[in-house]
Image: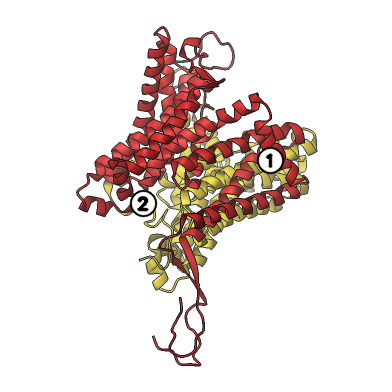
Chain colours: A red, B yellow
């Protein structure tokens, strides 16, 4: 495009272009910048409600690690978050928006609870393995249903998985009030506490869920990064048509991945029921299914980063509950800070994927030096 | 009995109607905002708090609308301008909004020294009362013309939104943005502006739904834990059930409202269905509707084509 010397630039003075590639160090820098900005914004919020941001932040961090009980509490919060986030990763990699983790956790917990309640005469090891498998199958089925309809009829998976969350939740309500109600408890209906035999063993003072979670981090990392399945997930996520053209059975991949995704979330449910709560109640998920989606996304769907992020989130949550007792400030501040951090990281992510191009006014030949 | 049941259904369906209308407007512009629950929670708090302090219903509703629109503005900024993932941003908004309302709600409780209660004067302005003349018609007068003022407001909003969507040029522009933003852009529509306006408008209406929950359902007392408990998600479900039409949402919300009060009106000695089943019904039926519409593969009454996908102008 030739331009005359005096002609003004007709392009908008700034426009946005997709970046082709970005170095890992730059991504890291931007992420740190985002976290820093969100801490400043969170600090301003704390200042606005009349507290000292530095002492609040210090209390959060110290509070989560101050005693061995607090540390164990933090780890207990991190475990379900981490496992669920790991479950979400394969589905999101495939661009299958599985926001049904809540429901999959619940189904895993329900299936596992069945064995805990009715087969607790079995030897401890066998019972736990059964519950482990049952939890995975329960969650897996709940992931498979929307995958089936998506691959067969193109049913919107976001809305479908969302609905399944609540169907699962009311299923618990039904079990609690009906067939599984503890006859020994008077008053508010609830399911009986698991017998000693059906509880997950403790390792180093915390239920074994943390070990399972760490093993899963490695397994999911290998699965996503180095296995043939992981590669197929990547391709389907990039372009279904490319995958078809390459001769992949897209339907099979979608079904398999969603079963896996649901199964891992179901495992989180099983661990919560048998390791932390020792029973099944409507509050079994504690909203983890939704938070985990944010965690997985924040970690750029990388299992190793997910480990770090979920521990940080657990620290934030535990620290805020400690803060409630020190500052008399509602622990809901944890949700607000989580929200602010996420908003900033979601916003900053833009700069890793896109760049601004400014239209420079140049004399003569030079059209646009973009 | 039947009249009482339908009356209660309308009462319970109104917050759903507001939430759904707001979400329809949002989704029609191509954005699936899963933050309805959060926006309703924020609206519930603002509506109550302003009503509590000023004793003015219009101000309370305005505040609820404002905070909902503000929350939606955050969402719009992130998804429209910064191209962030819609699902994640929406869920984050729910986390943030819930935390926001609970935090300031608790603050309000501690400042009031106990659960804050709306003044009698304010309660009178939002009380149910028969309209003059119309309210005296037998049956219909009781059923339709004896509600609290926000019920009428909700229905009027839904009708206006329906007209806006399907009878005005702005609505046509907005639907085309939701279906195919690239084509709309080429036709000279300011896609970004349309999205911002409609997302904020939708968020504001969701905020009103929240205010209804805290002002009417709460019985004039702020209860931190149970103001909004899943109604936002039912509203998202209702959008599907109403096949993205505010007019159909009026009847849809009546049906969903009926589900939520059904268990109190079913003769227990004749029909014995577990209570949990009534709560499950809206979601179960929505799922079935979702599957059936996808099986029919018709374009009518489905999600706008670009819903959930961000529009980036220079994408090829």
Mark 1 and mark 2 in contact? Answer it, CB < 8 Å: no
Of all chains, the one bearing label 1 is: B
Discs 1/2, front: 1
Q: Secondary structure at mark 2?
A: loop
Circle 2 residue = B301
Q: Residue at x 38, y 63 (%)?
A: B180
Q: Which residue is found at the position 63% from the left and 46% from the top? A: B42
Task: Give the side of residue A230 with respect to residue B88, left or right.
Answer: left
Residue pictured at 71% horizontal, 53% vertical: B59
Question: Relative to B314, is A139 above or below?
Answer: above
Mark sitting earlier along the chain (1/2): 1
> Can residue B151 be seen by looking at this rendering?
no
Tally of numbered discs? 2
Q: Nearer the viewer, residue B189 or B272?
A: B189
Q: Which residue is mark 1?
A: B103
Asked which secondary structure carries label 1, the reply is: helix
How packed mark 2 is, by other alpha carbons closer than 10 Å (few <14, some 14-19, many 20 or more), is some
Q: Nearer the viewer, residue A86 or B136?
A: A86
Marks 1/2: CA–CA distance: 39 Å
Which residue: 63% across, 52% down? A36
Q: Residue furthest front?
A: A25
| Residue A203 showing in the rendered view | yes
Q: In front: B85, or B175?
A: B85
Q: Name the side, left or right, on which A159 lies relative to A356.
A: left
Q: Position of residue B101 (x, y in %)?
A: 65, 42
x, y percent for residue A192: 51, 13
Parent chain of label 2: B
Judge from the rendering whether residue B209 lies leftward or rightward of residue A180; answer left or right.
Answer: right
Quadrant placement of the C terminus of chain A = bottom left
Residue B258 spot, x, y in % from top left? 49, 35
| Quadrant (top left/top right/bottom left/bottom right) for the N terminus of chain A | bottom left
Residue A288 locus on image (x, y percent)? 52, 35
């Amino acid at each position: 495009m030739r331009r005359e010397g005096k002609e003004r630039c007709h392009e908008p003075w700034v426009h946005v272009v997709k970046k082709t590639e970005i170095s890992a160090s730059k991504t890291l820098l931007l992420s740190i910048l985002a976290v820093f900005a969100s801490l400043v914004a969170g600090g301003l919020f704390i200042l606005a409600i009349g507290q000292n941001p530095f002492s609040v932040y210090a209390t959060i961090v110290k509070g989560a690690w101050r005693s061995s009980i607090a540390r164990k509490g933090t780890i207990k919060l991190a475990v379900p978050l981490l496992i669920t986030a790991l479950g979400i990763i394969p589905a999101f990699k495939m661009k299958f928006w599985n926001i049904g983790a809540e429901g999959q956790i619940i189904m895993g917990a329900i299936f596992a609870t069945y064995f805990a309640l009715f087969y607790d005469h079995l030897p401890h090891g066998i019972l736990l393995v059964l519950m482990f498998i049952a939890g995975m199958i329960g969650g897996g089925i709940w992931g498979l249903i929307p995958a089936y309809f998506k691959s067969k009829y193109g049913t919107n998976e976001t809305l479908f998985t969302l609905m399944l969350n609540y169907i699962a939740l009311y299923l618990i309500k039904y079990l609690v009030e009906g067939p599984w109600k503890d006859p020994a408890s008077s008053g508010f209906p609830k399911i009986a506490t698991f017998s000693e035999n059906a509880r997950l063993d403790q390792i180093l003072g915390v239920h074994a869920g943390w070990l399972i979670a760490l093993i899963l981090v490695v397994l999911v990392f290998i699965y996503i990064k180095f296995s043939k399945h992981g590669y197929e997930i990547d391709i389907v996520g990039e372009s279904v048509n490319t995958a078809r053209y390459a001769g992949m059975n897209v339907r099979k991949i979608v079904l398999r991945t969603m079963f896996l995704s649901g199964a891992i979330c179901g495992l989180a449910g099983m661990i919560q029921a048998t390791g932390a709560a020792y029973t099944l109640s409507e509050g079994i998920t504690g909203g983890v299914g939704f938070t985990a989606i944010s965690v997985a996304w924040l970690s750029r769907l990388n299992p190793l980063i997910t480990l770090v992020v979920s521990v940080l989130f657990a620290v934030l949550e535990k620290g805020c509950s400690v803060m409630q007792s020190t500052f008399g400030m509602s622990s809901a501040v944890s949700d607000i800070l989580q929200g602010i951090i996420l908003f900033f990281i979601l916003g900053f992510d833009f700069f890793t994927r896109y760049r601004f191009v400014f239209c420079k006014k140049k004399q003569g030949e030079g059209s646009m030096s973009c | 009995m039947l009249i009482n049941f339908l009356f209660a259904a309308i009462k319970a369906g109104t917050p759903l109607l507001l939430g759904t209308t707001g979400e329809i407007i949002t989704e029609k512009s191509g954005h699936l905002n899963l933050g309805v629950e959060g926006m309703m929670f924020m609206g519930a708090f603002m509506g109550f708090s302003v009503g509590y302090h000023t004793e003015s219903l219009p101000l309370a509703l305005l505040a609820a609308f404002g905070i909902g629109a503000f929350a939606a503005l955050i969402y719009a900024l992130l998804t429209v301008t910064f191209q962030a993932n819609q699902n994640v941003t929406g869920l984050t908004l729910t986390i943030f909004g819930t935390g926001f309302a609970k935090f300031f709600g608790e603050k309000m409780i501690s400042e009031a020294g106990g659960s804050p209660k709306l003044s009698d004067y304010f309660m009178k302005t939002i009380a149910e009362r028969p309209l003059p003349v119309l309210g005296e018609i037998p049956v219909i007068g009781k059923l339709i013309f004896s509600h609290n003022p926000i019920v009428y407001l909700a229905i009027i909003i839904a009708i206006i939104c329906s007209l806006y969507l399907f009878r005005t040029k702005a609505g046509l522009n907005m639907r085309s943005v939701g279906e195919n933003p690239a084509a709309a852009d080429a036709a000279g529509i300011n896609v970004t502006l349309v999205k911002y306006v409609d997302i904020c408008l939708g968020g504001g209406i969701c905020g009103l739904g929240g205010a209804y929950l805290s002002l009417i359902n709460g019985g004039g007392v702020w209860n931190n834990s149970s103001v909004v408990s899943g109604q936002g998600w039912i509203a998202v479900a209702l959008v599907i059930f109403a096949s993205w039409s505010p007019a159909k949402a009026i009847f849809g919300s009546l049906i969903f409202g009926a589900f939520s009060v059904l268990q109190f009106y079913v003769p227990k000695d004749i029909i014995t269905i577990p209570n949990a089943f009534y709560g499950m019904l809206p979601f179960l039926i929505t799922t079935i509707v979702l599957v059936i519409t996808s099986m029919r593969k018709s374009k009518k009454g489905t999600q706008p084509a670009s819903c959930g996908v961000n529009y980036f102008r220079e994408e090829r």
